[in-house]
Amino acid sequence: MQELKSGLGEGCDAVLAQWDMYATPKDDGISAEVYDADGEYQTTVRRRIDPSDLLALLRYGRRRFDEGNKHGAESVRAGLRAMLGAAPLEPLN
């Protein structure tokens, strides 16, 4: 992971380190961009964000990502069943 000054403060840097993330300050002087360990952009936050708010934001993002993966997998399974002409898993009433 990159070691860069985030401009967010020690508390936020500690939260980001626990999530294997890092932040880089933007040129606007008031925000920073958060990236995961692979360097993929995650979100933009204000530099004055409280560590507990940052943690809540990261947890929310992770939950939404997991829900999207679950929904996507269910959608793919349903599409394959339809393509194969298989009966749906739900009972027909």
Image (cartoon, rainbow, N blue to C red):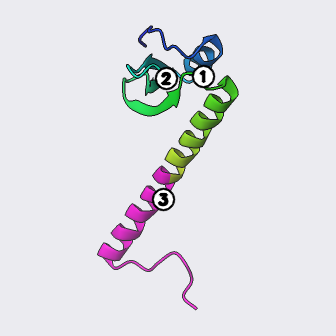
Mark 2 and mark 3: Cα distance apart in space: 36 Å
How far across and down, in percent of the image, does residue 48 sit?
Answer: 60, 22
How far across and down, in percent of the image, does residue 34 sit?
Answer: 46, 26
Q: Which amino acid does label 1 sit on?
A: Arg
Q: Determine crowd level at label 3: few under 14, some 14-19, many 20+ residues with C-alpha closer than 10 A.
A: few
Residue under the image location 62 percent in, 21 percent down? 15
Q: Mark 2 points at which residue?
A: 30
- Compared to residue 71, the image places residue 60 above or below, namely above
Q: What element carries label 3?
A: helix
* Residue 92 occupies quadrant: bottom right
How far across and down, in percent of the image, does residue 17 sit?
Answer: 56, 16
| Image quadrant in which the C terminus is located | bottom right
Instruction: Compare residues 76 and 12 and report the one nearer the observer.
Output: 12
Q: Determine crowd level at label 2: few under 14, some 14-19, many 20+ residues with C-alpha closer than 10 A.
A: few
- Asked whether the beta carbons under mark 2 and mark 1 sit within 8 Å of each other, the answer is yes
Q: Earlier in the sequence, mark 2 or mark 1?
A: 2
Q: Mark 1 points at which residue?
A: 48
Q: What residue type is labelled 2?
A: Ile
The part of the chain drawn in magenta is 68-93
Instruction: Compare residues 29 and 89 and report the one nearer the observer.
Output: 29
Relative to 16, 44 lies left or right: left
Q: Which of marks 3 and 1 is nearer the N terminus?
A: 1
- Asked whether the beta carbons under mark 2 and mark 3 sit within 8 Å of each other, the answer is no
Q: Name the residue under label 3.
A: 71
Relative to 17, 33 lies left or right: left
- Compared to residue 9, the image places residue 79 above or below, namely below
Q: What element carries label 1?
A: loop
